[in-house]
Amino acid sequence: MLPILNIAAYLFTAIDDPQALRTALLARALERELKGTVLLAPEGINLFLAGAAPEVRSFVDTLRADARFAALETKESWSAAQPFRRMLVKVKREIIRMDHPAIQPAAGRAPGVDAPTLKRWLDQGHDDAGQPIALLDTRNAFEVDHGTFEGAIDWRIDRFTQFPQAVRDHRDQLAGKTVVSFCTGGIRCEKAAILMRELGVADVLQLEGGILKYFEHVGGAHYRGDCFVFDGRRTLAPDLSASGGYASARAPEDPDFAIKK
């Protein structure tokens, strides 16, 4: 097994002390010699960490001991080298920026579909009620260009803040279908699915855990290409290996997650 454990995780949960929590989490991560990024906001936590497996899992266990983060679920992959250059913990207004403060997943999330069920639906060409599936890629256009599901809808957005208007412009494209929104790890779909329901799209589900969890459970069935990730690995193949090699330069920032200095 490769020596570096990489995890991605997020959870929408109320955090009333993000600045104090930032100090504590940074100390814990540095103590364990972890690298990566943790984003904190009043709406929740979003993290990408890498290091020795016992240290990564110890960090997650300690985090879950806090009742606010007990439900945190991780997506795991392994790498031969550390894909991050440093350890950052930052406080932001949103852990995924949509600029729609009324969308609060912690208050009630949209229903989801797990990876094995989605694969079965794609195998048979419809959901269990016989309704056709519309796979909706909520990621930015350059991410989609590295790989996506066969036949997925791609509205060519440059950042997630453009997604609400894209829904308004293309809502008719989703009529009469079971819409399954997806993204890298699931965080964008949490907000996207709620927004679409509020805008009148009748049947909307989110892919639980996103592309990474789909790869973990069912591999690359119905997926073409790789999955772009915002670390030194650049892209992951459906077997979760680093298909893009390792970049010596700093990985590009996702404009939706970018850490403002």
Image (spheres, helix red, strand yellow):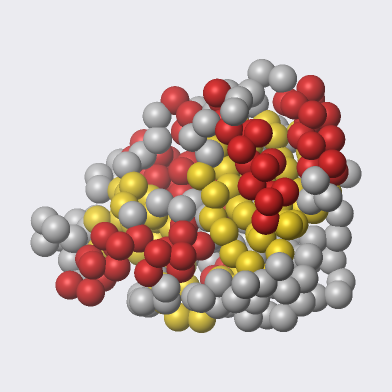
Using the rendered view, name the quadrant where residue 226 is placed: bottom right
Decide: is 45 above or below 210: above
The residue depicted at 63 percent of the width and 81 percent of the height is: 243
Q: Position of residue 56 (x, y in %)?
A: 69, 49
Q: Residue furthest left?
A: 130
Residue in front for this viewpoint, 108 or 114: 114
Residue in front for this viewpoint, 96 or 12: 12
Using the rendered view, name the quadrant where residue 234 is placed: bottom right
Query: Could you tell whether 232 is left or right of 138 in the image?
Result: right
Q: Residue furthest top?
A: 16
Q: Position of residue 260 (x, y in %)?
A: 82, 44
Residue in front for this viewpoint, 163 or 184: 184
Which quadrant, please, contains the N terminus?
Answer: bottom right
Query: Could you tell whether 26 is left or right of 244 in the image?
Result: right
The residue depicted at 76 percent of the width and 66 percent of the height is: 83
The answer to whether residue 107 is seen in the rendering is yes
The answer to whether residue 255 is seen in the rendering is no
Query: Could you tell whether 129 is left or right of 173 in the image?
Result: left
Q: Position of residue 227 (x, y in %)?
A: 56, 71
Which quadrant, please, contains the C terminus?
Answer: top right
Query: Could you tell whether 148 is left or right of 206 in the image?
Result: right
Using the rendered view, name the quadrant where residue 242 is placed: bottom right
The residue depicted at 87 percent of the width and 71 percent of the height is: 249
* Number of numbered discs on residues: 0
Decide: is 194 above or below 170: above
Decide: is 141 above or below 33: below
The residue depicted at 83 percent of the width and 50 percent of the height is: 33
